[in-house]
Image: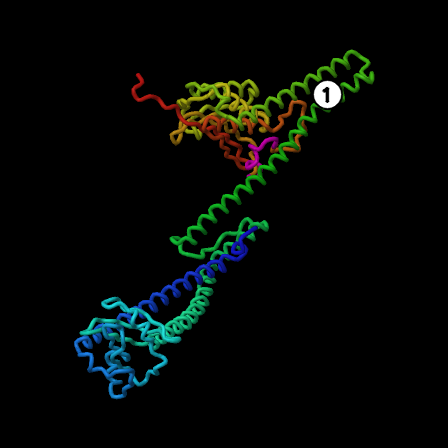
Amino acid sequence: MRHPLRRMSLRTRLLLITAGLLLAGLTLISAVVSDSLERYQLDRIDTQLRGFTELVARVPAGVLPAGDPRTTSLDPALDLIGAPYVLYLDANGAVTGGIHSSRLAAETLPSPEDLRSLPVHGAPADLRAGSERWRAVAAPAPGGTVIAAAPLAEADALISRLRLSSVLTGSALLVLLTGAGWFALRGGLRPLRRIEHTAAAIAGGDLSRRVPGIAAPGTEIGRLAVSLNTMLGQLERAFADRTASEARMRTFVADVSHELRTPLFGIKGTAELYRMGALAEQSDVDEAMHRIDREAVRLAALTEDLLLLAQLDEAPEAQLDRAPMDLRTLAGDARHSLRALDPSRPIELTGPGGEGMPGPAPVNGDEARLRQVVTNLVGNAVAHTPPGTAVRVGVGTAGGRAVLEVADEGPGMTAAQAKRVFDRFYRADRSRARTAGADAGLGLAIARSLTRAHDGELELETAVGEGACFRIVVPLLELSADRE
């Protein structure tokens, strides 16, 4: 079972703890003050009684009147010395004389039997006479013992009044401070309530909410608010990334399903025609087998591309076999490939940006994978520009990095197309009729992933009517300073 305090709010618990500590402190202070006052009163009375017994002990026994007379004339003197009752005992313990204040009744005085029990030269002792307490001291005297006693009624009344006053004052102070503490805690915990409201809003789905600046950054609440806002920002980004990832995955799965379904349906349809006997002539059978083979090749190529992309996503570095090489080799091969694909195209080999002559671009890379990237860019330039369109291949260094670029003077792309051109299964021209060997839209996605696996980037500069320039930018090969 949960403790009752745990079911209370933090403010109530803090207030109860504070009030409890305050009550304990006030009680302790009251006890210490009353005890100190009581000891002071007893010490004062004891000092007066000792001094008076020492004085009376020097007086002959016959000076004090016999019996138990009252006196009025000595009242001021007895009150002054603090011993309103004085008794003289002989050696046998018999009362030989005594005197007491007229304000004291005989029945309220301590009995002689109690007085005889006092030790001579002993410490002051408490006696009971009816409902009152008395303080008495005994001292030796010539031929007997002198006893001086004083009632403690006045001292007890003073202590009682002090305790009552402490209780009343402490109770009022406790109520006042508890009320003040309630409002202080309410104001002090207001930032926590604002944090609570923010957390409730976030739990309701509003991930953009943040804890406001409710305290100075150097305070505990301020540091808590900063930490919470940092955490909330990370959570919002994580949720946004997850949502975007799920959207990309849904699109990817839909595109993969579509791309795989097309060749599979072609193969299945051709097989159905053969099974139904619709291919009567041998030429029809040969054409059907050719179509099946073409779709199978396309399906195998698509599967290989998907597998490569998955491997690059999982462990890009593991797909590379690095070795020192120069991008000028790939640039020269790209020029020859362009001439072979379309001899009518003007082809120019320059430095980066079309300035100067081609320059060295040493890198530590996988030549086969980088050649795959360049081949894709060359094929992309040929496929998406009219025959005879000029193409420039640039290679060299720029900004401390190796650069190889393939630029054409074709129709270019819009900003929206350029933004998505590296997405998987994206085609800038969806209206083009797709031939049996049409690209599935994975080439540029694979090219960018391979470039990033080399710690580089595949960049694009394009505009409508101004052509397109794809630029491979990778780190330069770090040569040893003492290499001969």
Q: Nearer the viewer, residue 430 or 130?
A: 130
Q: Nearer the viewer, residue 120 or 464?
A: 120
Task: Specify the farthest residue to the front.
Answer: 92
Write down the quadrant of residue 96 in the picture.
bottom left
Task: Specify the farthest residue to the top.
Answer: 282
The x, y position of residue 105, in whole percent, is 35, 83
The x, y position of residue 86, in whole percent, is 26, 78
Query: What residue is disc 1 on?
Result: 267
Write down the quadrant of residue 76 in the picture.
bottom left
Query: What residue is drawn where x is 57% and y is 26%?
Result: 310
Q: Is residue 51 above or below residue 411?
A: below
The part of the chain drawn in magenta is 415-426
Within 10 Å of disc 1 (Cα), the crowding (few <14, some 14-19, many 20+) is: some
Residue 150 makes an appearance in the image:
yes
154 relative position to 264: left or right = left
Type of amino acid at the residue the image marks with label 1: Ile
The x, y position of residue 362, in whole percent, is 40, 22
Instruction: Reply yes or no: does residue 144 show up in magenta.
Output: no
Q: Nearer the viewer, residue 63 or 233?
A: 63
Residue 197 makes an appearance in the image:
no
The x, y position of residue 366, in whole percent, is 47, 20
Q: How many marks?
A: 1
Q: Secondary structure at mark 1?
A: helix
Q: Nearer the viewer, residue 240 or 163?
A: 163
118 relative position to 184: left or right = left
Q: Is residue 246 above or below residue 200?
A: above
